[in-house]
Amino acid sequence: MIDITYSAEVEAARAEGKPIVALESTIITHGMPYPQNVEVAAQVEADIRAAGAVPATMAVIKGTLHVGLEADTLQSLGQAQGVAKISRADFAACMASGGTGATTVAATMIAARLAGISVFATGGIGGVHKGAETSFDISADLLELAQTPVTVVAAGAKAILDVPKTLEVLETQGVPVIAYGQDSFPAFWSATSDLSAPLRMDSAAEIARAHVLRRAMELPGGQLVANPIPTDEQIPAEELAPIIAQAQSEADAQGVTGKDVTPFLLQRIFELTEGRSLEANIALVRNNARLAAEIAKELASL
């Protein structure tokens, strides 16, 4: 028996058939300090409500999966220490041991499926890390997209990754990668890259129809909607490239490996851009939340 608690808002939305958008919680516990983490999470939830949908932030708290967080619970989670960062491999273990864990992209997709939610907004997905040909460091997010039927709206893959290899793995796994409103695959903090997206769609209605058709065809897995950050809030790719290279070089020199690589790189890029990377990150998450709400509304009407 899976112990699930729904927030009052999400419970009402489920009863009334209102569109719901899933949100992850690692941005709260591992993304930025308190109180900024709670302020940003609340703003993203407000963006979804303003767009006509209901937000459902996911987290495991004392062994219970929470689908939607009440305001006081969000505040508590934002100040909590020692919160696990859970993915597919340790989701059930965290619940079984009565632990508290924030959901990554993969875990949020699983939670959304359990709650019957079809759309999830995040910042950027994980992917193939640079040097993966020797380290085999590939995010569980990619295989989750291949098997869990949730449409994920992200600003592409995190730009610190090996994005071409990430796209190759998604292709191999049969995951639709849909650029929204452009042919270029967006590069997280940057609106465009030199990579072409495999697919392009220009409306939330098209994306919703594709989601429904995949279910009707009994195809496993979800869709990745690559939504570019607004150009007036981006950091151009040519400006970021040497900064990312410097951060990666420092990580290599200091022997940073495994799960420590991503937080190290993000922190150094934050420092080297004098905080602009975090500002862009917040902008793209909010932009993704708004598009996800539009897709959820279209799905609710089908």
Image: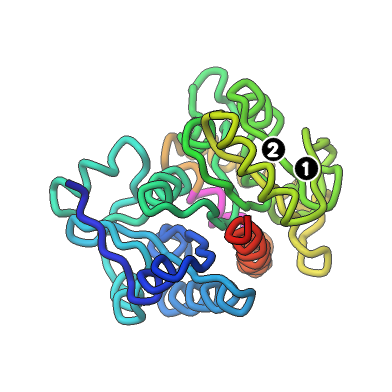
Q: How crowded is mark 2: few (under 14 residues within 10 Å), some or many (20 or more)?
A: many
Q: Which of 250 and 157 is in front in this view?
A: 157
Name the quadrant of the C terminus.
bottom right
Element on which disc 1 rests: loop
- 279 up-or-down from 295: above or below: below
Dot 1 amino acid type: Phe
What's the distance in space between the residues labelled 2 and 1, CA to CA? Answer: 9 Å
Q: Residue at (42%, 79%) from the top-left corner?
A: 35
Q: Residue furthest top?
A: 134
Q: First in sequence, mark 2 or 1: give its number.
A: 2
Q: Nearer the viewer, residue 254 or 206?
A: 206
Dot 2 amino acid type: Val
274 with respect to 230 (left or right):
left
Q: Identify the residue position indicated by label 2 in the image.
A: 177
Residue 274 appears anywhere in the view: no
Q: Residue at (41%, 60%) from the top-left corner?
A: 25
Where is residue 103 shown, x and y percent of the image?
38, 53
Callout 2 touching callout 1 (CB < 8 Å): yes
Question: In the image, which disc is placed on residue 247?
Answer: none
240 with respect to 28 (left or right):
right
Residue 260 painted magenta: no
Magenta segment, prevailing SS (helix, strand or loop): helix
Where is residue 233 shown, x and y percent of the image?
76, 68
Element on which disc 2 rests: strand
Where is residue 43 shown, x and y percent of the image?
54, 78
The magenta stretch is 263-270
Residue 73 appears anywhere in the view: yes
Residue 269 painted magenta: yes
Q: Toward which corner of the image does residue 60 lie, by quadrant?
A: bottom left
Q: Identify the residue position indicated by label 1 in the image.
A: 185
